[in-house]
Amino acid sequence: MGAPDLVLADRLFRDLAEATGAEPGITRDSYGAGEQAAHAIVRREAEAFGLETEADAAGNLYMTLPGEDRGRPAVFIGSHLDSVPHGGNYDGAAGVVAGLEAAATLRRCGRTPPQDVTVMAIRAEESTWFPVSYVGSRAALGRLPAEALDVARADSGRSLERHMADCGLDPAAVRAGRPLLRAERLAAFVEVHIEQGPRLIGDGVPIGLVTGIRGSFRYRKARCLGRYGHSGAVPRGYRQDAVVGAASLVCALDALWRDLEAEGHDLSLTVGQFATDPREHAFSKVAGEVGFAVDARSLGKPTLALVRDRLQELCAEISAQRDVRFELGELSDSEPAPLSAALLERFESLAEDQGIRTLRMPSGAGHDAAVFANAGVPSAMLFIRNAHGSHNPAEAMDLADFGEACRLLAGLIGDGWS
Ligand SMILES: [Zn+2]
């Protein structure tokens, strides 16, 4: 089979950037003008080279290259088309464009795949707009709770239901919760995405093969409480210093991460927010309160449970030592999603045949592929090397690296998967 020529991809990336440009970067708001524009562009291109297109009640778009045996479950390639405000052109869109480029490559070579290949443009993955995860993919699989339709969009204050209706979609059908897409119709779900961390750049490898998507638990509004006091007047032994208490916890968590990693656990632990109260704090005051957040992620459910237990124990130990107390507040969590080892090995062998260097790595961020994997669909993810992280206009993916992902996809769909 010929290599992807990237003519289609190049044009699509340019059209998307132009239509949804919002200096700096691009904005494709979920169920708003930006996402609508992106869907229209992608649909037009798919129809231009003969794919069958169809949208479901939630507005997810399916673009199908018919296969030889139309009764066989299809290989799905998909990602989201929405973005964060002033985001980059590739987070999400790269996965949809890669699917189209792979389908176009088969078309150009006159190849009919053994089974249908459906490129899926998924709605509303970025939870900056609606504080609900995976709206489009969960709606497709009948896994979106009805209450999600009542959630307000962060900027407009209008409900998801309203926004869907304004886009000409059918929120009542989504609320009914029936699957719009039957999981049995999928032989596999593959999501291509730019890497959002620095590993592929650091290791000089163009493609990451994702081993699994980490689950998480978060305490978004934890507090360490002590007692405010005069910095000159309160001796050390009398202090109930919330900064020292909270800082001790942060250091203990970092040591816990180091130790668990050394034992072979997959883990990341982050305290991304840490602040004294600006209404109360002062340079000459012992702090009586520190607000902080804890974000733990792992491929292993037992690891997450272990960290949660250790966190409680550490809070108790530090409280006793420092005469402070911890209130961790509300917990939110998500399940780890195991990806298909068979698909990963298939991509690994395709990469070997095609001379493409790859690296196995977990995904620390959540993706729609997690929804498909947790619904029992064999799922895979490919990461493309990318500088400067994602969700910002500086995302920098090399089109040549993108082409390697398209070659791997074309190899998979050309031979078929069951
Ligand atoms: Zn994304």
Image: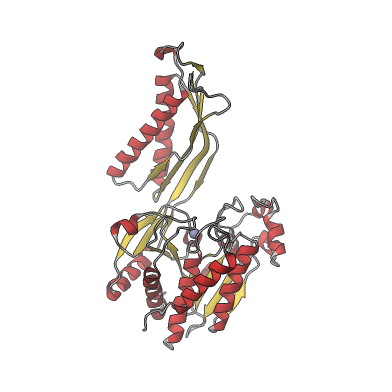
Q: Position of residue 18 (x, y in %)?
A: 56, 68
- In the shown orientation, is residue 202 left or right of residue 131? left
Above/below status of 114 relative to 386 = below
Above/below status of 83 relative to 291 = below
Above/below status of 186 relative to 329 = below
Specify the quadrant that holds the N terminus. bottom left
Quarter assignment of residue 165:
bottom right
Residue occupying image coordinates x 38% and y 60%:
210
Quarter assignment of residue 280:
top right
Residue occupying image coordinates x 38% and y 80%:
415
Q: Position of residue 212 (x, y in %)?
A: 40, 57
Residue occupying image coordinates x 57% and y 81%:
47
Looking at the picture, tell me which residue is in the foreground, 275 or 140: 275
Looking at the picture, tell me which residue is in the foreground, 90 or 300: 90
Specify the quadrant that holds the C terminus. bottom left
Q: Position of residue 417 (x, y in %)?
A: 41, 75
Looking at the picture, tell me which residue is in the foreground, 54 or 35: 35
Q: Can residue 404 be seen?
A: yes
Q: Position of residue 83 (x, y in %)?
A: 55, 59
Residue furthest front in the image: 23
Residue furthest bottom in the image: 110
Q: Can residue 182 be seen?
A: no
- In the shown orientation, is residue 171 left or right of residue 10? right
